[in-house]
Amino acid sequence: MVKTNNKTDQATTENTWAFLLEAKSLYKSFSGTKARFEVLKKLDFRIKKQETVAIVGASGIGKSTLLHILGTLDRPDQGLLLFQNEDVLDYDSLQLARFRNRSMGFVFQFHHLLPEFSALENAMMPALIQGLDKQTAAQLAEKILVRVGLADRLDEKATELSGGEQQRVALARALVLKPAILLADEPTGNLDKKNSEQIHDLLMELNQEMGMAVVVVTHNLALASYMAREATIADGRLDYLR
């Protein structure tokens, strides 16, 4: 029997694609009252495994639109979105939902927790959606909640948590299945300076520990400074600032 080296096989597979996620020539427009408004114009974006990128700039330039397309929450009018060199825009709705659940984690300015559920139950949701049994889902959720500093708040309902704690639950929910990419849209927009700094530090620690790529859309220049690269959108295209 021929033995295979799983680590070698994995490395060989990863070497066939240069980028974890790559967007090519994205075009997106919206209809206004009098004309069509072009938001993205042949925009290109690339990120490698474990890289971190901040997208900054004024409201209305297309930052959130780009993030939603990268996360397959929205589709471009034209363009490709390659995950490990496979165009996920060719997937049907069910395939896309499974892809998002398996490979993407999302954190937004508003935590979107289910208020009647506990911190543990909220964090379990992606695992349950994937089809894991309740016990396994609870174990995974508890582990990540402990990691984000909520070991003593597992059974508290979302409405009984502070703003900073709610955003930690949202982060735990996003990471419970160890996604390849975390997409965050103004993740500290509703937090005070102290809680914002704690979330900043936590994001970078988890980026290193979990090996995930991170894309953050933010007005917070302090958060942007934590990222390895920083870009804005100018005339519908990505413009790297550093």
Image (spheres, rainbow, N blue to C red):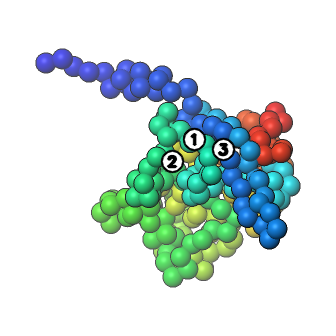
Callout 2 touching callout 1 (CB < 8 Å): yes
> Which picture quadrant has residue 32?
bottom right
Whether residue 1 is situated above or below residue 46 in the rendered picture: above
Residue 26 numbered tag: 3
Name the residue located 62 percent from the left edge and 52 percent from the top edge.
77
> Can I make out residue 120 in this image?
no
Residue 180 left/right relative to 235: left
> Which picture quadrant has residue 24?
top right
Q: Position of residue 35 (x, y in %)?
A: 80, 63
Sequence-wise, the earlier of marks 2 and 1 is 1
Name the residue located 21 percent from the left edge and 19 percent from the top edge.
3
Please state which of residues 11 and 58 is positioned toward the viewer in this rendering: 58
Q: Amino acid at mark 1?
A: Leu
Location of mark 1 (residue):
80
Identify the element where label 2 is drawn: helix
Whether residue 95 is situated above or below residue 41 in the rendered picture: below
Tell me the distance, in whole angstroms, between the alpha carbons under discs 1 and 3: 7 Å
Q: Quadrant of the C terminus?
A: top right
Identify the element where label 3 is drawn: strand
Tell me the distance, in whole angstroms, between the alpha carbons under discs 2 and 3: 11 Å
Of all residues, the one furthest to the front in this rendering is 34
Q: Amino acid at mark 3?
A: Leu
